[in-house]
Amino acid sequence: MRKTCYIKAMTEQKDFDYTRYFELKKQLEEASRLYYKEGVSPMSDQDFDFGLKEMEALEAKYPELRGQGSLTQRVGSDLTNDFAKVAHAVPMLSIANVYSAEEMAEFVRAAEDGIASLDSAPQDDAGGKKRAKWICERKIDGVSLSIVYENGRLKQAATRGDGAQGDDVTLNALTIADIPEYFDAKKLKIDPSEIPQGTFEVRGEVYMEREAFERLNEQFILEGKKIFQNPRNTVSGSLKLKSVAECKTRPMQDARREPASAQEARVPHERLLDSRYH
């Protein structure tokens, strides 16, 4: 009798978990579609991440749920049918989030263990492995953009897309004053010989300051247009505008962060930050 009750309870729990999983799947897939395709955020980033973690836990409990198309197995995509596609030479990955001190401690532990396991890990004077050195910076809440220069002139700008390929938004990117169409040695106060030759890719964030966002919404209210939800979604939608002239009216800014090629990526991140802020 006890065995029968146990099996029944297990079956009921599995039915409950399956129902919960597919509820989450439907909710998060719709939220993802609205965010990437229509620039609408029906739920907070934190609620979305918590839902995704719950899905991951259920997939770990029931591996048969983890299909190739599972939301937990793919990077969100901003790809649309309105723009040509650009393959990224180096994948553009997303950033993981933590929401508690415990999660942060686990991230630090895993990172330091991974570094210590490398043969090239730095050693201290006693021959032991040094602790990792951490470089921290504020996260700009914007839209990732890859910009490729060729012989000092902007050749292509692309969104992150699905990580492997993005949308070509070159013309719209050129409307952003912070993004130079070419490297001007005089403005940069460098010798012309220092301008990178060949192909040079840099990545960063396109963003909109809160005050500029609010002024844009006020203007739209006066014009009887639908207002935007938040600065990040506004930037995402602005970069995908079909009208370059309209895109030029959007007060977007750009913060370049890092070179993408393997050669430039060997430059310590601390030096990249020093060159950006000093």
Image (tube, rainbow, N blue to C red):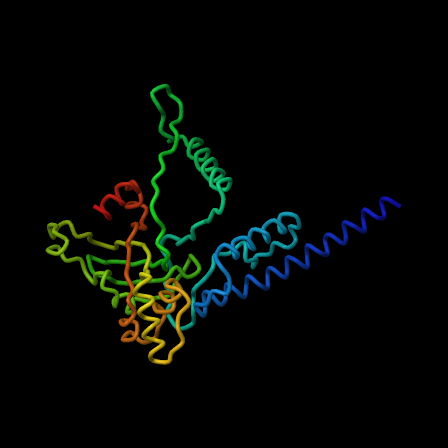
Which quarter of the picture shows residue 144? Answer: bottom left
Extreme residue toward the top, this view: 126
Q: Is residue 144 above or below residue 263?
A: below
Extreme residue toward the bottom, this view: 224
Q: State left or right for residue 46 relative to residue 255.
A: right
Extreme residue toward the right, this view: 1
Which quarter of the picture shows residue 249? Answer: bottom left
Residue 12 image position (x, y, % from top left): 76, 54
Q: Residue at x 36, y 25 (%)?
A: 123
Number of numbered markers? 0
Residue 70 image position (x, y, % from top left): 57, 57
Residue 98 image position (x, y, % from top left): 47, 46
Q: Residue at x 76, y 49 (%)?
A: 10
Q: State left or right for residue 144 relative to residue 109.
A: left
Q: Residue at x 49, y 67 (%)?
A: 34
Q: Is residue 47 above or below residue 30?
A: above
Quarter of the image containing the C terminus? top left
Residue 163 image position (x, y, % from top left): 42, 57
